Image (tube, rainbow, N blue to C red):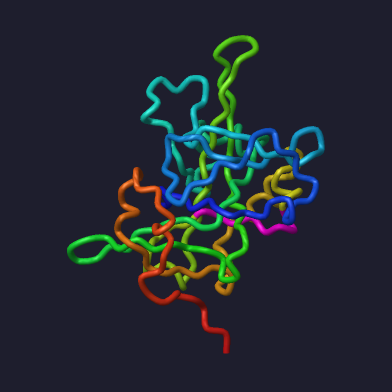
Amino acid sequence: MTGRLHVQNLPLTRLLPSLGLQDPLIESPNLAPRRPISAIRLEQGQYRLSSVFWGLTPPWLEVLDHAPHCARSETLESRAMFRDAFGARRCVIPVSGFYVWKTQPRSKQPFLVTQVSRAPLLLGALWCRYHTTLTAFTDSTALITVPANILLSPLTDRLPVVIPNHALSTWLNPDTDTETLNSLLAPAPLELLGAFPVSKYVNNPAYQSSACAHPTGSMLRWAVS
């Protein structure tokens, strides 16, 4: 399950020309949970980028360490933690890639998963709001994960769901019906994503060098005949 993101050099205004920037994009070559992260939401009919806390914290959550940073797609409608947010409060997290770890006999090898074209990815997520006073509040989020496709399943069993650019308005619209939403919760197309091994320095969330994303081997990608 994804626990780190790569967020750098994202041409968001080219991807979404109408995007409003409430907060600047939070960039990091090794972004870990329990930190601020940038999310795109639909507010009054406009796409808006703002900062949220990565770890879903509904108002009744008593222990912050229990805030999930990921939500399994199969439990979105059955778990109280996710049900209301899935129905009405969805967002996307723009990233340049995300890290997964392949289990090996003596250690785990980190891989960076990116779009093969290296274009930005929009990861499907939920968000909720916790009011500290009548006027002050904190928004938080959790990524939604789905089973990995057959290309990437040797690396990990689950990956964040990727929302296609053409489906962004459908995903963010609070009035979209559940059947349509569930149709978007599918593994990424085989030709969309690739993955390459990177340095184990990324295992340390304090390591914030751009070298986190330097390939140490060739990209695993789908071979189209």
Give the residue displayed 34% in from the left and 43% down from the top: 206
Q: Position of residue 144 (x, y in %)?
A: 53, 47
Spot the residue most to the bottom. Answer: 225
Query: Which residue is depicted at the point 57% across and 28% down?
Result: 139
Residue 192 coordinates in the image, percent (x, y): 58, 69
Q: Position of residue 109 (x, y in %)?
A: 30, 63
Q: Is residue 199 left or right of residue 130?
A: left
Question: Is residue 162 inside the magenta stretch?
Answer: yes
Please give left or right for residue 62 compared with residue 17 in the image. left
Q: Quadrant of residue 212?
A: bottom left
Q: Nearer the viewer, residue 35 or 107?
A: 35
Rendered-image quadrant of the C terminus: bottom right
For residue 96, what is the image quadrant?
bottom right
Against 221, residue 102 (above or below) is: above
Q: Nearer the viewer, residue 90 or 97?
A: 97
Residue in view at x 60 percent, y 50 percent: 94
| Residue at the image point whose x is 59% and y is 55% from the top | 9
Q: Residue furthest left?
A: 106
- Please state the total of marks drawn on the protein image: 0
The segment highlighted magenta reads: 160-167
In this rendering, the answer to whether 100 lies above or below 48 is: below
Give the camera-side residue of 198 and 66: 198
Q: Is residue 1 magenta?
A: no
Across and down, in percent, residue 92 comes to 62, 46
